[in-house]
Amino acid sequence: NAGVTQTPKFRVLKTGQSMTLLCAQDMNHEYMYWYRQDPGMGLRLIHYSVGEGTTAKGEVPDGYNVSRLKKQNFLLGLESAAPSQTSVYFCASSYVGAEAKNIQYFGAGTRLSVL
Amino acid sequence: DQQVKQNSPSLSVQEGRISILNCDYTNSMFDYFLWYKKYPAEGPTFLISISSIKDKNEDGRFTVFLNKSAKHLSLHIVPSQPGDSAVYFCAASGGGGADGLTFGKGTHLIIQP
């Protein structure tokens, strides 16, 4: 049982380039999330999805787009990368439910550097 | 404006003793609180949680206490073991915003042999 898998694990981009981070979960979870973690900071919510075909903005959505075409996948896109987007990105998923949705299962993260 | 605060960036505790990690919050709408543990190069893993209607939840060596009037929660680990060395994040939900968690900055717990 793989849980939550993120690809790639590492990436270096030049300013202005685009890329897509992929998150896949095999737990049949309804909810999926994208967070970023900067040095000395906690995780901050970028976007999330409460089901296939739905997405919503989190705390820091600017500069990112997301798509949830399949229940098991949640994609995070950077259309024109900026140095301020250098961070570690974590994907998470959870079951539906007032309390269950808070117990989130995280992937190992994608370390992104934008030069 | 940080809504979840962990004011101790690091904490060193001797093996076998009690570790106490603290967390304060400002948003009175939070109704569920969690602790996550994170090792280097891994994602956070869920440790223990507590609903705002309770004041204590226990799971083996881990106990979380919630003081709503003070907007304060703490995680007690007893006895502390070497494998407990990690970064611990306090998180909260139900703050009236998005359907996700609001995290503190984390406390790096170091268990000394």
Image (cartoon, rainbow, N blue to C red):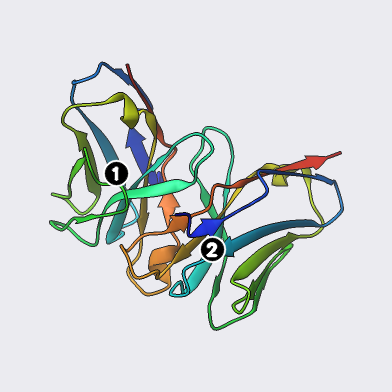
Q: Chain of mark 2?
A: B
- In front: A49, or B98? B98
Q: Is residue A115 above or below residue B71?
A: above
In which quadrant is the C terminus of chain A drawn? top left
| Residue B97 sits in quarter | bottom left
Q: Residue at x 62, y 60 (%)?
A: B23
Label 1 crowd bin: few (<14), some (14–19), many (20+), radius 10 Å: many
Q: Residue furthest bottom?
A: B53
What count of labels does the image hold? 2
Tag 1: residue type? Ala
Q: Which residue is mark 1?
A: A24
Viewer-nearest residue: B73 or A103: B73
Task: Indicate the position of residue B5 as horizontal and vertical percent values.
Answer: 56, 56
Q: Position of residue B4 (x, y in %)?
A: 52, 58
Q: Residue furthest front?
A: B1
Label 1 vs label 2, nearer the camera? 2
